Image (tube, rainbow, N blue to C red):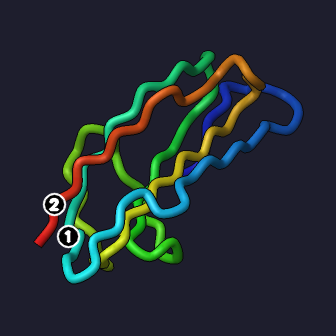
Amino acid sequence: MPYDFGGSSGWPTVVVGESVVFMKLPGRTFTAATLNATSVLIPGDAVRYYLSTDASHWEEVSPGALHVFTTPGSSLYWRAVLVGYGGSSSYVSLIKVKPVVV
């Protein structure tokens, strides 16, 4: 999905933040999770959120919606990608992940 910056000129800034191993449960499997986030964005900036169970296959998620993994696993990672022209004016201040484990 392309980013729409409302006709802004110049190159956008891309900032990626991600966890190392957010949660690990040997012998158990993460099958789904809900990510909730708090962010401050200036108009035209965007943030995309991703979850992974292996830090290789990243799946885009919608905050507040249950996401069922196409690749279940025993570790859980999150990633936030902030794109825009806001510099340090836009930021993600909180990420919470509620997993479903079997």
Q: Residue furthest right?
A: 10
Q: Would you say 23 lies left or right of 48 here?
A: left
User: x and y percent of residue 86 in the render?
Assistant: 73, 22
Q: Would you say 86 lies left or right of 43 here?
A: right
User: x and y percent of residue 27 in the render?
Assistant: 21, 83
Q: What residue is at 70 percent from the left and 17 percent from the top? A: 89
Looking at the rendered structure, the kind of residue marked 1 is Thr
Q: CA distance from mark 2 to mark 1?
A: 6 Å
Q: Would you say 23 lies left or right of 65 here?
A: right
User: x and y percent of residue 52 in the render?
Assistant: 41, 66
Q: Would you say 40 lies left or right of 34 here?
A: right
Looking at the rendered structure, the kind of residue marked 2 is Val
Q: Which mark is residue 56?
A: none
Contact? badges 2 and 1 (CB < 8 Å): yes
Reading the chain from its start, which is encountered first: label 2 or label 1? 1
Q: What residue is at 57 percent from the left and 21 percent from the top? A: 41
Helix, strand or loop at mark 1:
strand
In the picture of the structure, the residue carrying the numbered disc 2 is 100
Q: What residue is at 41 percent from the left and 37 percent from the top? A: 95
Q: Would you place residue 14 above or below residue 38 in this image?
A: below
* Neighbours of disc 2 within 10 Å: few (<14), some (14-19), many (20+): some
Q: Nearer the viewer, residue 32 or 60?
A: 32
Q: What residue is at 51 percent from the left and 26 percent from the top? A: 93
In the picture of the structure, the residue carrying the numbered disc 1 is 31
